[in-house]
Image (cartoon, rainbow, N blue to C red):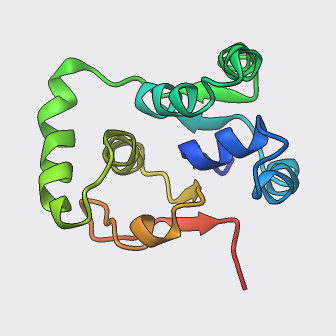
Amino acid sequence: MKRILVDTGPLVAIFSPQDRQHETCVHTLRELPGPLLTCWPVITEAAWLLRPAPRAVQQLLGIIDGGFLELLPLAGAEAPSIAKIMQKYEDIRPQLADAALVYVADREKIETIFTLDRRDFAIYRSGRGHTLRIIPEVE
């Protein structure tokens, strides 16, 4: 089964019907195998961005481990590795959520990410030097 990471942008767009990427993300979501995978820094960032809509935050939290969205664990001992990723890409000022996703993608050998942040995720590389396949693909 293909495993896919999800970044903050699509989660916010899915729970925000007024978001300009809402339709694209909902359409993409329908075509993906579940569950999508993410980590707590992404959920925290999404909840912060969704804070004007408390119901959306509740919905986001409600889908965790319900077959739609699964959290990959991050242990405290992994923080130095995530910090190294942030340092490596400091010229593009990576967010903690991005660095955590790059780290878990490498750790879990996941090759695909559902993100709207094409600029940064086209630059990030795994420890093996690979880029992540970004969806949705744009023409």
Describe residue 123's horizontal placement relative to residue 14 as left or right. Answer: left
Q: Where is residue 94 in the image (x, y as percent from the top left)?
A: 29, 53
Residue 61 found in image quarter:
top right
At x 35%, y 72%, the residue is: 123
User: 19 or 35, which is in the foreground?
Assistant: 19
Residue 107 found in image quarter:
top left
At x 76%, y 49%, the residue is: 19
Q: In this view, does 120 lie above or below 1?
A: below
Which quarter of the rendering shows the C terminus? bottom right
Residue ranking furthest to the front: 52
Q: In this view, does 68 lie above or below 7?
A: above
At x 40%, y 23%, the residue is: 73
Q: Where is residue 131 in the image (x, y as percent from the top left)?
A: 41, 70
Q: Position of residue 65 (x, y in %)?
A: 66, 17
Describe residue 38's horizontal placement relative to residue 101 as left or right. Answer: right
Q: Where is residue 128 in the image (x, y as percent from the top left)?
A: 26, 65
Describe residue 14's horizontal placement relative to residue 47 as left or right. Answer: right
Is residue 6 in view from this perspective?
Answer: no
Describe residue 131's horizontal placement relative to residue 54 as left or right. Answer: left
Residue 97 found in image quarter:
top left
Q: In this view, does 68 lie above or below 111?
A: above
At x 36%, y 70%, the residue is: 130
